[in-house]
Amino acid sequence: MPGELIRVEKEIGEGSFSTVYLAREKSREMREVALKVCLKKHIVKNRMVIYVQREKEALAILSREENKHPGIIGIYCTFQDAESLYFVLSYAKYGDLWNLMRKQPNKRFTVKDAQYYSANLLSALAHIHKHGIIHRDVKTENLLVQEDGRILLSDFGSSKFLKDYETQPPVSDKNQNTEEERPGRARRASFTGTAQFCTPELLEGQRTDPATDIWAFGVVIYNFLTGILPFEDISEYLIFRRVQAVLYDFPEDFPDENAKDLVERVLVKKQEDRLTSEQLMAHKFFESIDFEKLQEMEPPNIF
Ligand code: ADE
């Protein structure tokens, strides 16, 4: 956005392909926004154009008045200049949930807080799936916390539209379309942290569907309640081997039997055997949650 309309205040985050700044929109009483800046030459050189387009398209769809959901990051506008592409996004004051979790006693969430955050994530996932969008990079770091304590699902750069999937055959030739079907791999060198949330189907170049996000949802709940990750090893290669074999276990002090049951029904190799979002909402772990009234719940005070 031209400098006269937006004032950049400070850098708040850096990824491999973008830098995020806190900025203020002069035209809207200096509303706080996050300004994500992607260097064009970097994007083109690393063949990231498709990811930037996807993010823009997905967020544009989800920001339409009729498609809005309170748990999904909002996009106000995009613009560009000779060097960069800019996304003006809703600002999440407390940063990402991974960093907040690390600051909690025992470096994990209580069962109650984990229920709150995972219920909100599940609601957001059910919503995007209903609109034909799969996120494909669901992870604790992609949950941002706003000033009021509510979370936003962010980073739609790996997302995929179900409609365009339906018009394409599943990928059988391993050399075909692999970058398209395997964002975790294609981006492996540059996006840290994704390997642990990757699914067997992403690794094997098979079709992805909403169940891909549901797997990652299971990894997120495990992470919330233990502070660690179910699939962890000394190299990405070994992590991928564990994911493919669904090789993980629960620490002895795993705090909740219902959560354990839920995770076991989600970290399942075959997509069709995983619980769906509707089944998850009815799971015992969410017994105390009224999904119709999530917005009325008081967010955890973890700051
Ligand atoms: N880091 C990345 N995106 C962000 C956002 N929208 N708000 C705050 N921090 C961020």
Image (spheres, rainbow, N blue to C red):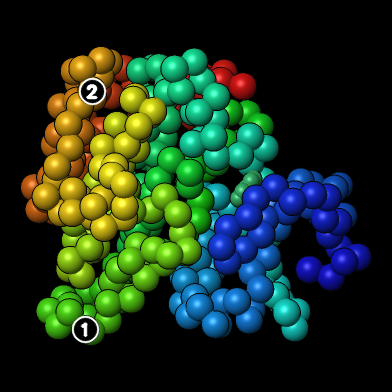
Task: Decide: is 297 above or below 193.
Answer: above
Task: Decide: is 225 above or below 79.
Answer: above
- In terms of depth relative to the viewer, which is nearer, 282 or 222? 222
Q: Where on the picture, by quarter, is residue 183?
A: bottom left
Of the numbered discs in the image, which one, if any, rests on residue 220? none
Residue at 20 percent across and 33 percent down: it is 263
Rendered location of residue 66, percent (x, y): 49, 55
The C terminus - image quarter: top right
Q: Would you say residue 140 is visible in this rendering?
A: yes
* Residue type (three-letter) at the residue carrying disc 1: Asn
What is the secondary structure assignment of the residue under circle 1?
loop
* Residue type (three-letter) at the residue carrying disc 2: Pro
299 lies left or right of 236: right
- In terms of depth relative to the viewer, which is nearer, 113 or 178? 178
Residue at 21 percent across and 17 percent down: it is 252
Cα distance between the residues tagged 1 and 2:
39 Å
The N terminus - image quarter: bottom right
Numbered disc total? 2
146 lies left or right of 250: right
Assess disc 1: are there few (<14), some (14-19) or many (≥20) residues with their C-alpha within 10 Å of its C-alpha: few
What is the secondary structure assignment of the residue under circle 2?
loop
Of the numbered discs in the image, which one, if any, rests on residue 251? 2
177 lies left or right of 303: left
Rendered location of residue 62, percent (x, y): 49, 58
Assess disc 2: are there few (<14), some (14-19) or many (≥20) residues with their C-alpha within 10 Å of its C-alpha: few
Q: Would you say residue 69 is visible in this rendering?
A: no
Rendered location of residue 214, percent (x, y): 26, 46
Identify residue for label 1: 175
Say which label, 1 or 2, has the lower sequence index. Answer: 1
Is the residue under label 2 in contact with that under label 1 (CB below 8 Å)?
no
Q: Is mark 2 within 8 Å of ligand 1?
A: no
